[in-house]
Image: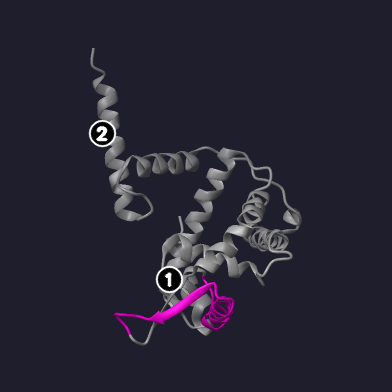
């Protein structure tokens, strides 16, 4: 016997999903997007106990704690990365991150590589020049824009990267600590949501003088 009630409920669920996609561009139009929407929707109805944190009783906000923990995690990651490149020709973790991006995504302009790593131009250029000096990347004129330089990883760069990859992988594993597989997937989902939010703002190259006010006025009201 066909369960028509289930079919009707499923159709209503899909209609609600499509309506959600019209108001929020956070979900892909496929089964994965549907599952993510269901998970998010369920999370809004299932009460979760709040964790405790230092200063909570004195009024310290969740936003303050999140910012502090992100800063701390960045410092922990840098410490592991520093150990991973100890006694090697790499100067900073950004050196091998730039090489990893070139290996993974292929040749690109200097600015494309700098923006991919969310860095200011002066800092990014210092890193690229250091890689060029070491012979790990080479540059050539762009065929489409003579004002731009295309850079790509060299055989020497691949060798230098490969020699450290074992320690680099170990460092990345240590950063995720004792999280379970499901916890890692949930953390990726949350960080990806934050990345998507902030990346579109960063891409606009807003002036520092107006950044806080513009983001607060134009983006935070849309926060669910």
Mark 1 or mark 2, which has the lower sequence index? 2
Q: In terms of image quadrants, where is residue 54?
A: bottom right
| Relative to 216, residue 66 above or below | above
Q: Residue at 32% across / 50% down in the picture?
A: 21
- Classify residue 109 as left or right of residue 132: left
What x and y, as percent, mark residue 79?
A: 72, 62
Circle 1 residue: 218
**In the structure shown, which secondary structural element does the residue marked by tag 2 occupy?**
helix
Q: Nearer the viewer, residue 59 or 151?
A: 151
**What numbered label is drawn on residue 11?**
2
**Could you tell me if residue 217 is visible in this image?**
no
As rendered, which of 28 and 121 lies closer to the eye?
A: 121
Q: Which secondary structure lies at badge 1?
A: helix
- Where 43 falls versus 203 (above or below)? above
Residue 138 left/right relative to 29: right
Please, which residue is most extreme toward the bottom here? Answer: 147
Q: How is the image coloured?
A: one colour
> What label does residue 55 carry, if any?
none
Instruction: Sort mark 1 into few (<14), some (14-19) or many (20+) by Cα contacts within 10 Å.
Output: few
Whether residue 2 appears in this view of the structure is: yes
User: x%, y% of residue 85?
Assistant: 69, 63
Marks 1 and 2, how far apart in space? 35 Å
- Segment tinted magenta in the rendering: 118-145
Percent across and percent down for residue 53 are 73, 52
Is 181 situated above or below 9? below
Give the quarter of the figure containing the N terminus. Answer: top left
Judge left or right: residue 196 versus residue 57.
Answer: left
Nearer the observer, 188 or 215: 188
Mark 2, Cα crowd under 10 Å, few <14 / some 14-19 / many 20+, is few
Task: Where is residue 102? Give x, y as percent.
Answer: 47, 66
Membership of 166 in magenta stretch: no
């Amino acid at each position: 016997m066909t369960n028509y009630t289930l079919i009707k409920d499923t159709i209503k669920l899909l209609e609600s999903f499509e309506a959600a996609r019209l108001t929020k561009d956070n979900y892909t139009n496929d089964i994965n997007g549907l599952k993510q929407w269901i998970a998010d929707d369920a999370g809004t109805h299932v009460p979760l106990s709040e964790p405790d944190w230092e200063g909570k009783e004195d009024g310290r906000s969740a936003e303050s704690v999140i910012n502090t923990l992100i800063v701390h995690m960045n410092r922990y990651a840098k410490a592991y990365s520093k150990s991973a490149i100890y006694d090697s020709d790499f100067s900073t973790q950004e050196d091998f991150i730039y090489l990893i991006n070139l290996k993974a995504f292929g040749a690109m302009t200097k600015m494309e590589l700098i923006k991919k790593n969310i860095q200011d131009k002066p800092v990014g250029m210092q890193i690229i020049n250091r890689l060029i000096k070491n012979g790990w990347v080479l540059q050539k004129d762009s065929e489409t824009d003579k004002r731009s330089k295309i850079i790509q990883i060299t055989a020497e760069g691949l060798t230098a990267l490969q020699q450290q990859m074992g320690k680099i992988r170990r460092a990345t594993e240590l950063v995720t600590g004792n999280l379970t597989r499901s916890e890692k997937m949930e953390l990726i989902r949350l960080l990806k949501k934050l990345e998507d939010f902030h990346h579109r703002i960063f891409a606009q190259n807003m002036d520092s003088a107006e950044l806080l006010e513009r983001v607060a006025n134009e983006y935070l009201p849309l926060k669910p």
